[in-house]
Amino acid sequence: MADTLSELAADTVLTGRVHSVRIAGAGFSVQAGREDVSGCGAISLPLHVHLHGQRIGVLTAYYDRGHPPDESTMDFLNRRAAEAAVAALRLEGALAERASMARELSETLVPQVFSLRRSAGNLRRRLHEPGPAEQASEELLTLSTATLTELRAFVARLHPTALDGAFTEAVRVHAASVEAATGLRVRVECTGEPPVELHEEALRVVRDALADVVRRASATNVTIRLHHNEIEVQDDGAGTCLGTRRTGFGHTPAAESPVF
């Protein structure tokens, strides 16, 4: 759904009516067009959801100072704001659904599988003689451990993180949610942030990297280092040859960015 908001912002700029557009609200923020708008005039239009009678965000359009939008452009921007309100409402619903799924997994399935794994471990300790029962308990323990790891990784991916322009804070919020869900200790260090237009992609990379660390199950500490054109995720696990992942940004296409 976030892509829909991004496309709306980009399409609005491509018409040539304004230089830059930012659509933002609680849990979402996208921008297209000129990054430096310090010398521009601006007009903000609320994103209203008439069915609920509430404002869920703002569309801000930037234009040449001294040349405000004419009536035709204002009509166009109002239509775009209405479209953005619908897209934002859908995004809000999707994030709420993901949060509900993550909460349900954390509160029900994860504890159940954890109990299953603990029972399998107790059973193995009570079996002193080798045989079919001991082999079955080993298989049960292995399966329950793998299932618990996958569930924790899935929960880490599901936890939604509001990206309202403060990228580093969004990373810290997601890191805290992963800590709470998995028991990992996650530290975030920042010397710079990627460009605004890459914030969504960069946050996705961080989520995927943390989910991979959780899945390997051998790590207890993770450090995320944010730089202007690179994200580094380092852990103390033994599941891979290298405990460090670096992802480049800038001139590197998003689809080719992960470097392990």
Image (spheres, grey):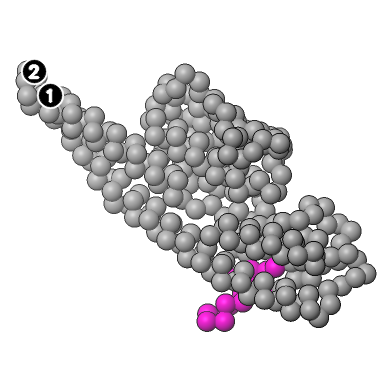
Give the residue type at disc 1. Gln
- For residue 204, the mark is none
Relative placement, left or right, of 253 versus 206 is right
- Range drawn in magenta: 46-59
Q: Give the residue pinned by disc 2.
A: 130
Q: What percent of the width, then of the height, locates residue 86?
A: 56, 71
Circles 2, 1 touching at the beta carbon (< 8 Å): yes
Name the main secondary structure of what is drawn in magenta: strand
Q: Which residue is drawn at 42% across and 35% down?
A: 214
The three-letter code of the residue at mark 2 reads Pro
- Marker disc for residue 135: 1
Residue 189 visible, this orientation: no
**x then y, percent, for residue 140:** 18, 32
Looking at the picture, tell me which residue is in the foreground, 107 or 150.
150
Q: Where is residue 126 in the image (x, y as percent from the top left)?
A: 11, 25
- Secondary structure category for the residue under label 1: helix
